[in-house]
Image (cartoon, rainbow, N blue to C red):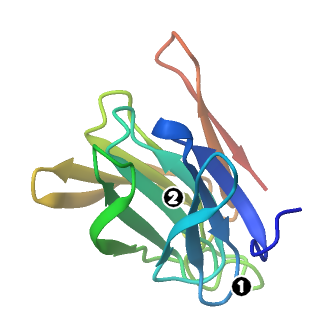
């Protein structure tokens, strides 16, 4: 346990030994820590209950899935320091599924960048969908549904095969 980290739900390691740790609260947060777990920066995730994070392949962006608000937070990272720079961008999912107990609205559960870093994918349990957010010089240039899951399946996590053009989707 590290004093000051309240409710860590997920963490990823970045350049220069930085650790990006999600604080799973109603007002979700991101804490950035150095090698000694000293907090060097904080940011809001602009959503509720962040549960998964990913770094872009080049280390220039960080994304987080906000489960309860059904949104994704996207930060640009400073190349020299690895710290978030500029405003955080919120991407709101839309949709629901047939299981009204757990799919009354969107619930972003996983985020990941494509190998080329040009698309951010987000798996949404509530919307039964994988969203594809196209990234460009000006930020997000568009959003599409990359895959529509079986209604009611509640997709949670995506993993890519390391060499083959295959992805595995885990659903409830």
Q: Is residue 6 visible?
A: yes
Q: Is residue 146 visible?
A: no
31 and 58: which is toward the camera: 31
The residue indicated by pointer 1 is 100
Residue 94, located in which quarter of the rendered image?
bottom left
77 and 66: which is toward the camera: 77
Q: CA distance from mark 2 to mark 1?
A: 16 Å
Residue at 30 percent across and 28 percent down: it is 116
Q: Quadrant of the N terminus?
A: bottom right
The answer to whether 2 appears left or right of 134 in the picture is right
Measured from the top left, where is residue 64 in percent x and y? 51, 62
107 and 57: which is toward the camera: 57
Residue at 28 percent across and 44 percent down: it is 79
The residue indicated by pointer 2 is 129
The answer to whether 92 appears left or right of 87 in the picture is right
Label 1 crowd bin: few (<14), some (14–19), many (20+), radius 10 Å:
few
């Amino acid at each position: 346990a590290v004093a000051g980290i309240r409710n860590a739900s997920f963490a990823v390691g970045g350049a220069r030994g930085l650790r990006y740790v999600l604080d799973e609260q109603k007002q979700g947060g991101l804490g950035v820590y150095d090698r000694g777990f000293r907090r060097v920066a904080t940011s809001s995730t602009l959503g509720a209950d962040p549960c998964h994070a990913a770094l872009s392949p080049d280390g220039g962006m960080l994304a987080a899935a906000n489960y309860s608000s059904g949104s994704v937070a996207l930060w640009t990272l400073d190349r020299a320091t690895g710290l978030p720079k500029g405003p955080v961008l919120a991407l709101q999912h839309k949709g629901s599924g047939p299981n009204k107990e757990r799919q009354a609205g969107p619930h972003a559960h996983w985020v990941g960048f494509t190998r080329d870093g040009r698309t951010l994918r987000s798996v949404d349990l509530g919307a039964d969908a994988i969203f594809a957010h196209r990234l460009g010089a000006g930020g997000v240039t568009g959003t599409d549904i990359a895959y529509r899951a079986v209604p009611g399946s509640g997709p949670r996590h995506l993993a890519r095969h390391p060499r083959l053009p295959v992805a595995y989707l885990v659903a409830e």
